[in-house]
Image (tube, rainbow, N blue to C red):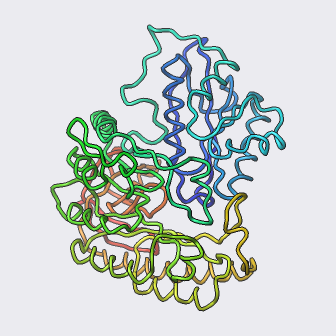
Amino acid sequence: MSQNPPDLRPDLARARVTETARSGQPTIGMVSLGCPKALVDSERILTRLRAEGYGISADYAGADAVIVNTCGFLDSAKAESLDAIGEALSENGKVIVTGCLGAEPDYIREHHPRILAVTGPHQYEQVLDAVHGAVPPSPDPFVDLLPASGVSLTPRHYSYVKISEGCNHKCKFCIIPDMRGRLRSRPAHAVMREAEKLVSAGVKELLVISQDTSAYGLDIKYAEERGHRAHVTDLARDLGSLGAWVRLHYIYPYPHVRDLIPIMADPSNGLLPYLDIPFQHSHPDVLRRMARPAAGSKTLEEIAAWRAVCPDITLRSTFIVGYPGETEEEFTHLLDWLDEARLDRVGCFKYENVAGARSNALPDHVPEAIKQERWERFMEKAQAISEEKLAAKLGQVMQVLVDEIDEDGVATCRTAADAPEIDGNLFIDEGTQGLKVGDMVTVKVDEAGEYDLWGCRV
């Protein structure tokens, strides 16, 4: 099954389906597009279907029907989702659409009237009803055994854990609150139960995701139940005690984020010294036009404070260039801010209108040629900073997690500073005999590039 290629979606989570269907078993295929949060939705749908006796097909030809879990965040992502729906219709014919773009059923049916059903994001029951109508279940209770950890679309050694859904922010360029609603946090004990099962099943890394991880528990008043409190600091400490790496994504730089840093600096806790923070811009006027809850000067002060407590912390972020009204002065401010912030991992998007976003109505939209030119200047700056920071790691000894070993014996690994699919890698190109995917090994860094490292086992 296809997914968004990494060059189009930097937040891609790679899907893997390996099981073989039994004779006569109805099978469902899944095309999972967009971010890791959508991937978790896909895993939950497939887990429910697997529990009902359906097999999971890795290709169109082997599927009795196909579910396309769409992305609708940007117009380019909408176009990609429509292409994926069209491909599934052409290759299979029986297609059920869900996900963020599913919130616009008329738009989808206008382009693809032959689809069987459309549901919105995280509408699991409606997806199951649509599957039942297209392909009736035929379970065999003596054969169809569901793994204790459910169906996973990621490698066995890491897994995404979604702790909440929705978002309370009203950023003008974003329509996620319209598609996925306001913040709805899971009880902390439920998150912990899921995480414990994953670690027991061999997962070495838990990637915590949501729309706004910093706000976790706010809607349920940080409720404490069964010994676990629904607050990001408490959850991070609890998850970090399970013996696996714990990586936090989508952290807004609220003041209480500073309480996470001492936990990250504690080597006895599995919470990685890694923060994924969507700064988006640095200039206060641009942030105000975005309706973002942050200010560039204050974030620089926070970054300095974090590094004072945890010097090894890795900071990654994404930015938007060419936002409506962005002047050359405001863009230069962003470049200067980046020079001072010295972020480790950086992504950048050129602004584009999204149907329903309030930013569409802002005056002074930036011409495409200027957006492109600013994007290139930004990425040149970010690349130079990345290269410098990686060069400083030469000679260091560190733990890495093995993600893949190719036919030539080259091991693709990740350090604590690297999230899967969106950050860099560390490669071991010799002495990999006996290594397996999911192993944690010690290496010494002996070569550095713009985004990746190379090392040898020690």
**Up/down of 334 relative to 221, above or below:** below
- Picture coordinates of residue 265, whole percent (x, y): 20, 65
Along the horizontal axis of the image, is 303 left or right of 41?
left
**Up/down of 197 relative to 20, above or below:** below
- Picture coordinates of residue 400, whole percent (x, y): 30, 57
Q: Name the residue: 73% across, 81% down.
A: 364
Q: Quadrant of residue 412?
A: bottom left
Q: Nearer the viewer, residue 406 or 44?
A: 44
Q: Nearer the viewer, residue 439 or 98?
A: 98
Q: Name the residue: 67% across, 83% down.
A: 373
Q: Quadrant of residue 389?
A: bottom left
**Up/down of 15 relative to 173, above or below:** above
Q: Is residue 400 visible?
A: yes
Q: Name the residue: 80% across, 35% down.
A: 90
Q: Is residue 160 visible?
A: no
Give the quadrant of the C terminus: bottom left
- Picture coordinates of residue 54, whole percent (x, y): 56, 20
Residue pushed farthest front?
A: 221
